Amino acid sequence: MTFAVHLRKLLHGALAQGSVLLALCAVAAVKPPEASAQEPPDLPPCPSQAEKPDVPRLIQRIQRLLEGASSTAVMTMTIRTPTWSRTLKLQTWAKGRDLALVRVLEGGPRDTGMMTLKRDKQLWNWLPQAARVMKLPSAMLGDGWMGSDLTNDDLVRGTSLVDDFDAKVTGITKLSGGEAWNVVLIAKPNAPTVWGKLEMQIDRARCLPVLERFFDEDGRPVRSLLFSDFRSAGWRQFPAKTTVVPEAKGRETVLQYLEFQFDVAIPDDTFSLQRLRQGR
Amino acid sequence: MWLALAWRNLWRNSRRTLITVAALGLGVLAITFLHTYRESVYGQLLDNVTSGALGHLQIHAAGWQKNPELERVIADPAAAEAAVRKSLPGAKIAPRVLGYGLAGSGEQSTGAAVFGLDPSREQADLRFVTIAKGKHLSAAGQREALVGIDLAEQLGVGVGGEIVLVGAAVDGSVANDRYTVVGLADAGSGELNGSGVFLHLADAQAFFGLGAGVHQLVVRLAGGGEDVSRPTAQLQAQLSNAELEVLSWDKIVPELKATMTEKRKAQAALAYVLFALVGLGVLNAMTMATLERTRELGVLASLGTRPRQLLGMILLEGLLQGALGVAVGAALTVATVYAVGDISLEAFAKQDMLGIRFPSTIHLALHWGGLLQALQVALWTALVGSLLPAWRAARMKPAEATRSY
């Protein structure tokens, strides 16, 4: 009996959900802190007019836009698979890149109230029916997220587009109501990333990606992220809707922000493990 | 008369005959003992397998064996069970659920295979686990768990402790709950002992949101045996449900069946090589025996004995030696098997073969099939070994033969 194979395969399924939850932390964590409508002076400007913009500076700008100090948000997450679909309502708190908490506000009878805490590179789950906290084993952190729509790498380490990739503009794509630069990012040798290549379409007017395609080290496509429903918060714009489409089979995960607040004061004990253990 | 003559001839050089008989006997012993040992091991292995994780047969939702997804359940296990009882009277049936998740205790957590089983159906010669410590699950689902002995060690949990399980339920929700560890389980393989958590069937069904569905109906036949193609066909005919699949143990672990077949072939080849050597010994002995008696055989021929009769007499001598060899070998085998009795494989006890625990003690049971095979081979060997000398003796010219000293 090939239990090991079944185990691995099905664990991925079991963890897929967790990973999507956790990925939200990353999305939430990258919301900007500044409330001012004025762009910070040291932010590289958006080179909308350039046919071939300076890609490293463009990506720096995007990363600055998508990196922040603290935020809270309420969102729905809709997961569609060939056999089931469900929608969860989530609340997230995030502080920097290292602290995040997701709480399931509305879900099934057994997972409403579930919480996932990210501290540095470790993840804990509060399990409401078991009324216990379980730490995610590090072996799962290392390789366990592959069956999911978002990878563990998104959350715990986070690939640095600037440091880990060589990027260049390869052309222009017409979008409905605008144009986008096609940018190809190739992983540098020995870069600590799970991806071999990324293809992005970056909206010229907003300087924000509308599509990202991820390829593994063998050049096979793994998943696509689609960004839409752009909203403004202070000087920033950000996509309120993210659709994750894995290459594998009929799955899809849609994140839709309902409320968001940036640059808010979040008490430190929000991310305390003791507090998580009490299920609050 | 020819028989008596052949018999008397045998003992004219009794030392040589005894040596030939001993060679044949030892050959028979080697073959039958190896055969007996091998078949005893297989018998026991098969018994272990069919009384534990696999059963002789299993019923699944169609396609489950190939792709064991959580949602592929036997929706109406009661109907399928009725079909088993009707087509295979006396068979035992154990319903089981198989899913996966994370098991945690305290700060430790790791991936686990989560099984649901009905303790009242898991008994005697059909039981997935043996209890290494503590007790079995209660008759009704009371959120109790058995934990594989190695997994328990890894998680640092013992009898009376608590284990938390998380997994994905069939509707996509996050299944999570905690269970009291009532016992540590030995599931008969290192893999299962290191990853298995065993819940009451009802608890597992609730955990994964399966309703009344189960993944396996494990069937242990009353008679058993290695070839279960007939009961498989009978059950298939009775079920006649395209939603379900019936698989015999050799389809579930084809590697095991293939290994057995392979080893049997290899040993048969060994047997033939061994007897080819013994056959050369027979040839040598009979050649000597006929050469020594050239003159005498010439006299017999001169007195009117026909070549066919000479041929028959010498072949008979060979056959008699063969028969004696078989008798000696069989006696030696029986004596050895009963003297040895059980063979302890304690040194290998922790080893698994293809995910199946190797039996730690082999009880040797004489296999008449092996003896019969050795009997045939030994007689043929003796016959073929004496054919050439007999042929030569029959064809020699009496005049020349009588002149030789």
Image: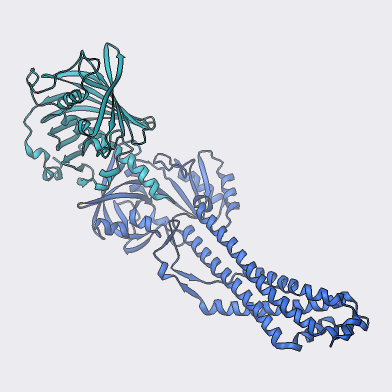
Chain colours: A cyan, B blue
The quarter holding residue B121 reads bottom left
Whether residue A187 is visible to the viewer of this picture, yes or no, is yes
- Residue B99 spot, x, y in % from top left: 36, 46
Q: Nearer the viewer, residue A156 or B117?
A: A156
Does A221 sit left or right of B90 as displayed?
Answer: left
Q: Judge whether B383 appears above or below B154 on screen.
A: below
- Residue B211 spot, x, y in % from top left: 37, 41
Q: Nearer the viewer, residue A272 or B35?
A: B35
Q: Nearer the viewer, residue B201 or A33?
A: A33
At 30% from the left and 18% from the top, the residue drawn is: A171
- Residue B235 spot, x, y in % from top left: 56, 48
Q: How many marks?
A: 0
Does B109 sit left or right of B296 as displayed?
Answer: left
Whether residue A109 is visible to the viewer of this picture, yes or no, is no
Which image quarter is the C terminus of chain A in? top left
Question: Looking at the image, which residue sits at the far top?
Answer: A177
Does B212 sit left or right of B14 as displayed?
Answer: left
- Residue B384 spot, x, y in % from top left: 75, 71
Q: Judge whether A252 appears above or below B149 on screen.
A: above
The quarter holding residue A18 reads top left
The quarter holding residue A93 reads top left
